[in-house]
Amino acid sequence: MTDQDTRVVEALLFLASEPLDERALAEAAGLGEADVEEAIEELLERHAPGASGVVLERVAQGWALRAADEAALACARLLDRLAQRPLSRAALETLAVVAYAGPVSRPEIARIRGVAADNPVQSLLERGLIEEAGRSDRPGQPLLYRTTTRFERVFSLEEGRHSLPRIEELGEDLPSADEVRSRLEAMAVQEAVSIEEPGPAAESA
Amino acid sequence: MELDLEPFAGPFDLLLALVLRDALDLGEVPVADVCLAYLAEIDAAGEIDLESASEFLVLVATLLELKIRLLLTPELVEELPDAQEAAEELAARLAEYARVQAAARWLEERLAATGPRLFREGPPALRPPRPILDDTATGDPADLAAALALVMERAREEAEPIRMLRRRIPLLRLLDHVRRVVRTRGSCTFDEAVAGLDRGEQAAAFWAVLDLIRAGEVRARQTEPFGPIRMRAAGHAAHDRERGAAA
């Protein structure tokens, strides 16, 4: 591997609008994958945070350049992104359903969240975080949605969806269905007792 | 009372908050007041937001169901048909939803921790979009003009109006026709009465039969769908005798 090879790989990454894996880079550069890996090692140093305004990162199962954090605000001004509002809770929940259960249809999202999903789905589509992924073979053949590469880059997921934590790891205090059920019943019993109690008292009075 | 459902992302969210945080004594929630407050809100808004209205309906229905459970003794709740199944389903869905919320929280924290990510976006640079014209096309503007002319010509053909003649069906004459056939034969089927007439006239003849029935001149019977319609004159002697015998 020569310095020139490194510069070629650098140019490829500069040009690409999507993360590239070693194979794609090797193919375009006319290099072996081992050479590409070496070039990336070199480029990771050259484009490390603090060393360059353009940072090379592992994301979405590939390699991609992005603006350094310190330049983000200026870049956002250039791209007129400042006006973008943060994701609503409904949008975040919908995104979570699509990321973990996708491809998934709008009715399915609504069933899981217990509320219509039209607005959050629309907002996520507009932000390019989810995209259409064919149609379900369920009645009505609703459109299916999946998360995009953009989602993986925005959320900095190195190996794409594989980098999402497993649901069980999300929290120790997550209630199981049985627990929710017994809480519901406990509430019911407690209430029933407190409602029954005044009964005999009223009779005796 | 004041009603603010905004902080909750949906009925499941509210229910889960109620069940897990014990923040509220469900028995004390005045569902009727909630409904009245909501109706007042709709009245004030002047128009109904169907989406939020249907969400509200689900919410109130779920609240009501829970309240009913609270008001009944556990033994009575057990006796409710499908109560067990419904409770299990509700619990399973709430537990599933709790996981969705946890995943959403993780995404939110992740986003806050990584900060804004800005990168080049656009069509994949290594795969240029497929050209619209294939290699066999000459690219001559004259070809384009010719193609357009062809399309315009076709559009003009398609736009050609179809002339339909307005048919005049002499209703009164058909009324007379049906009346005459039934009177002279005493009884006959509808098919026999309209033999020789075209579809439009047959349809009009059917109207005529209905009108004669209404006027009491004709009686008709059809024993099965699409079966023959038997008609006879209501004033016919044989018919009168039958009626007399029956009376």
Image: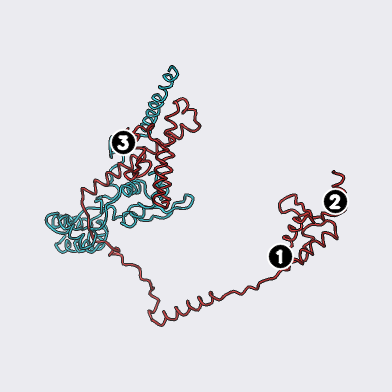
Chain colours: A cyan, B red
The span from disc 3 to disc 2 (Cα, nearest Å) is: 83 Å
- Kindly give the residue lying farthest to the bottom in the view shown: B142
Left or right, residue A24 beside residue B207: left
Closer to us: mark 1 or mark 2? Answer: 2
Distance from label 3 to label 1 (Cα)? 72 Å
Res. B184 image quadrant: bottom right
For this rendering, which residue is in front, B119 or B203? B203
Mark 3 lies on a secondary structure that is: loop
Circle nearer the N terminus (1, 2): 1
Q: Residues within 10 Å of mark 2 (few under 14, many from 20)?
A: some
Q: Is residue B244 left or right of residue B221?
A: right
Callout 3 touching callout 2 (CB < 8 Å): no
Measured Cα–Cα span from mark 1 to mark 2? 31 Å
Q: Give the number of the disc on residue B199.
A: 1
Of the residues shown, which amino acid type is indicated by label 2?
His
Residue type at numbered disc 3 = Leu
Number of the label disc, if any, that sits on residue B239: 2
